[in-house]
Image: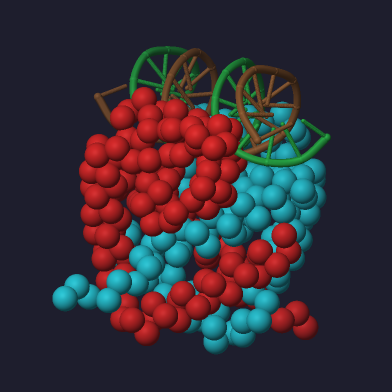
Chain colours: A red, B cyan, C green, D brown
DNA sequence: TATTGTTATACTCTATAACTATA
DNA sequence: TATAGTTATAGAGTATAACAATA
């Protein structure tokens, strides 16, 4: 007899994530941003990174993809790029005041979204969820 | 004093989902498919749907987007479309033997992925995860 | 030669709007 | 007029490959 079938957890995760990420995208767009822009701003504000390669890796995209976004963000006055004096191959990316303002704006939207998302869940639930998601993450990363 | 900051659960979910969905995409592509093709095949095999509109909704995409995928799938010999005799506006979508074969192929890949994904988690963990994800889903859907 | 980043190009998925055919 | 689906077009995000500049 086959083991009792249960809905593949990957499917449940995919469905939830799809619904959540679409709603989150919409919230970010409504706040004047987008998911990649938010991730880039967040990474720039919370980590001290030496170059674009590290930034791309932290965000989870390729270098060329990051360039693509940074071009748009620079054109939009959100960031500046400055060559490192000692190693002119390296670009230092910095937020402009407008970039910081958008960061705060998007942070507010992200926070509001999160409060909505975790309605009815207490800290213990969230700890459990985080633990299991961490495990899932590790299970995938292992194979890499 | 501000409440103790915890990583927004949406961010944790987004990161896990991104990593998981990329890995899942790769697994499906390696097995000769893609995520939308898999979702369409899965929906066709597991539900009895009357028309393409319902299929699109079940998959979570727009009608025009579904047409786009079905065109490619029909060209690839995976599905056939047949007009309803009684209401010729309606298309009935059916899997060909090749479509069924790809379904089995992708189902195998999805199953293998799922086993890898849930390594180290027992049924109780998965129940808890499913429950919390269901709650998250409901929290978003509420706002729609 | 190796590293950092950019440019050029293209692919996938998705969407909206306008359209055809049918009811 | 309303409904089912298609066509045309476009946009966002991502990627690879080839390249320039620097070390």
Residue B11: image x %, image y %?
41, 61
Residue D21: image x %, image y %?
61, 22
* Residue drawn at 72 percent across, 46 percent down: B29
Residue B119 in the figure: left or right of residue A92: right
Residue placed most toward the observer, A5 or B142: B142
The mark total stands at 0
Residue placed most toward the observer, B86 or B72: B72
Residue placed most toward the observer, B5 or A28: B5
Can the viewer see residue A103 in this picture? yes
Residue placed most toward the observer, A24 or B65: A24
* Residue drawn at 47 percent across, 48 percent down: B60
Residue D21 in the figure: left or right of residue A47: right
* Residue drawn at 42 percent across, 70 percent down: B134
Residue B122 in the figure: left or right of residue B4: right
Q: Which image quarter is the C terminus of chain A in?
A: bottom right
Can the viewer see residue B51 in this picture? no
Residue most toward the left? Answer: B1
Residue B87: image x %, image y %?
49, 33
Relative height, residue A55 to residue B125 (above, below): above
Residue A76: image x %, image y %?
32, 28
Residue D17: quadrant of the picture: top right
Residue A20 in the figure: left or right of residue B22: left
Q: Which image quarter is the N terminus of chain A in?
A: bottom right
* Residue drawn at 77 percent across, 48 percent down: B30
Relative height, residue A118 to residue D3 (above, below): below
Residue B46: quadrant of the picture: bottom right
């Amino acid at each position: 007899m086959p083991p009792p079938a249960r809905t593949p957890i990957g499917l449940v995760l995919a469905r939830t994530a799809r619904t959540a990420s679409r709603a989150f995208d919409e919230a970010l767009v409504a706040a004047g941003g987008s998911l990649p822009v938010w991730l880039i701003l967040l990474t720039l504000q919370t980590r001290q990174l030496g170059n674009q390669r590290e930034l791309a890796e932290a965000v989870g995209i390729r270098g060329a993809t990051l360039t693509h976004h940074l071009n748009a963000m620079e054109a939009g006055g959100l960031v500046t790029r400055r060559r490192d004096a000692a190693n002119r191959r390296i670009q230092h990316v910095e937020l402009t005041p407008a970039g910081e303002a958008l960061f705060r704006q998007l942070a507010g939207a992200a926070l509001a979204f999160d409060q909505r998302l975790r309605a009815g869940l207490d800290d213990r639930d969230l700890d459990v969820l985080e633990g299991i998601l961490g495990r899932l993450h590790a299970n995938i990363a292992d194979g890499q």
